[in-house]
Image (cartoon, grey):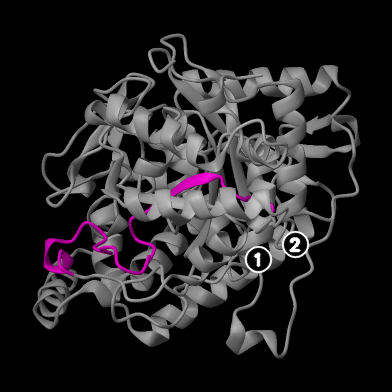
Amino acid sequence: MLDTPFRSATQLAAEIRKKKIGCLELLDLYLARVAKYDGALNAIVVRDFERARARARAADRALAKRQVWGPLHGVPMTIKESYDVAGLPTTWGVPAYKGNLATTNAVAVDRLLGAGVVLFGKTNVPLYLADWQSFNAIYGTTNNPWDVTRAPGGSSGGSAAALAAGLTGLEAGSDIGSSIRNPAHFCGVYGHKPTWGIVPRTGQALPWQKAPVDIDVVGPLARSAADLDLALSVMAGPEAIEAAGWQLRLQTPKQKRLRDFKVALLLDTPEIAVDREVQDRLLALADFLRTQKVKVDDRARPAIDTAEAWAVYTRLLRAATSDRQTDADFAKNQAAASALKPEDQSYYARATRAAVLSHRDWLAANEARHRMRLAWAEFFTSYDLLLCPVASTAAFKHDQQGERYDRTLVVNGQKVPVTDHLFWAGYTGASYLPSTAAPCGFTPSGLPVGVQIVGPQYGDLTCLGFARLLEREFQAFVPPPGYA
């Protein structure tokens, strides 16, 4: 078993219930580690230690009376800065919101507190949650515990870094462009992007937002697949306005062993190259699965054109985030979009057009998305899961110069736009599918690599069940060196 700070939240909760460790004792262990290690990482940027200590003491008193608050009783937890926690700032890394103090909790925060967690801080994000790095003018830069010269991912980068370094017991993030999956992959932890709509996003939003945002979800990050399963069971389900009419019942997976699964494997596409070091880890996983008599098909694909999927996702993604523009920004982007040549299909051009998309054109993109959803549904009548990359490379070096769409990274010796990474977010995410990012080993230089486990809509528990089997039989979480 791993040392206490690196144990799963499920294990920590069990040790608390058995009184092998006290709630305050465990919290203080994590707070001491924050003091020791977070100066170099800058992952936990909002700290609420005294309220947490008061809650941990109350949790100890409750347990002494044989009162258990829930399945996560006393487990110390941090959460992504974009979630509202009453009395704490919610800024999304935007300087204009620096003074924005939440007056209520996000729905997911209330549900986690109801399950017994001790919430002691919030973790760093990029500006507007819009980068696969985590830096902003309010809180500064978060570093990857595997190599502090590299990004921890984004936008839930602080979440994944804190988990990997053993600074917290559990985390929760959000994902519209792989913002849960990418940091899990970069930092060697687990993350689950739920089926769209099954976990309320209320209170994990910009100040003016009340409506759900297309593609965007909230979900857990953890050091084990079992934790994802438990945290999802806590977070998921309708909120009050919907609960009068529907209930969530996710199907329990019928597969009990690896050999019960039939999976497809996708390593790259003609449009988006994937670095050989990442492909090699997925191939190693495929080889292992075949030894376990898993049916692995490396040619099966849904009847979807990947180039169209990439274009449609970009259009829907940037349309979904277009309300962040001021009137002046909108007018500027209208002029810029009008000046673009029709043949310009760069990410910048597609994103600029999408930011000022007409409703008629959005309806066309949504129709294309729905056809893809039907193609995915048909595909999953023959295959249980799709295994594919989370991103084209392992964690890359910090690069904060210029705009994101101007930055590049090296894939198989060639410079490519960093925004190419987003393909692996949208290929499945735009169709509302669930996916779990799970550890899949390491590059030759020792950087973590994750695998993306994609299931059918509402097949969350099948993704998580497969991840649990891989954790037990192939690759589990490994702490980064230097954080013992």
Q: Position of residue 145 (x, y in %)?
A: 35, 25
Residue 319 magenta: no
Residue sitting at x 36%, y 39% = 153
Camera-side residue: 64 or 175?
64
Residue at x 90% of width, y 36% of height: 260
Residue at 37% x, 28% y: name it: 33
Vertical placement of residue 178 versus 152, above or below: below
Q: Is residue 91 magenta?
A: yes
The answer to whether residue 125 is above or below residue 265 is: below
The amino acid type of the residue labelled 2 equals Ala
Check contact, mark 2 vs mark 1: CB within 8 A.
yes
The boundaries of the magenta stretch are 71-99
Q: Residue 377, labelled with which disc? A: 2
**Quarter of image, res 412:** top left
Q: Is the residue marked by circle 1 packed among few (<14), some (14-19), or many (20+) residues within 10 Å?
A: many
Element type where label 1 sits in the image? helix
The N terminus - image quarter = top right
Judge whether residue 413 can be spotted in this image. yes
Q: Residue at 35% across / 69% down in the picture?
A: 86
Residue 7 lies in quadrant: top right
Amino acid marked by disc 1: Arg
Q: Quadrant of residue 22?
A: top right
Residue 332 at x, y percent in the picture:
10, 74
Question: Is 313 drawn above or below residue 326 in the view shown?
Answer: above
Q: Is residue 273 visible?
A: no
Q: In the image, which disc is placed on residue 373?
A: 1
Q: Main secondary structure of the magenta part?
A: loop
Q: Is residue 71 left or right of residue 93?
A: right
Instruction: Say which element carries label 2.
Output: helix
The front one of 447 and 33 is 33
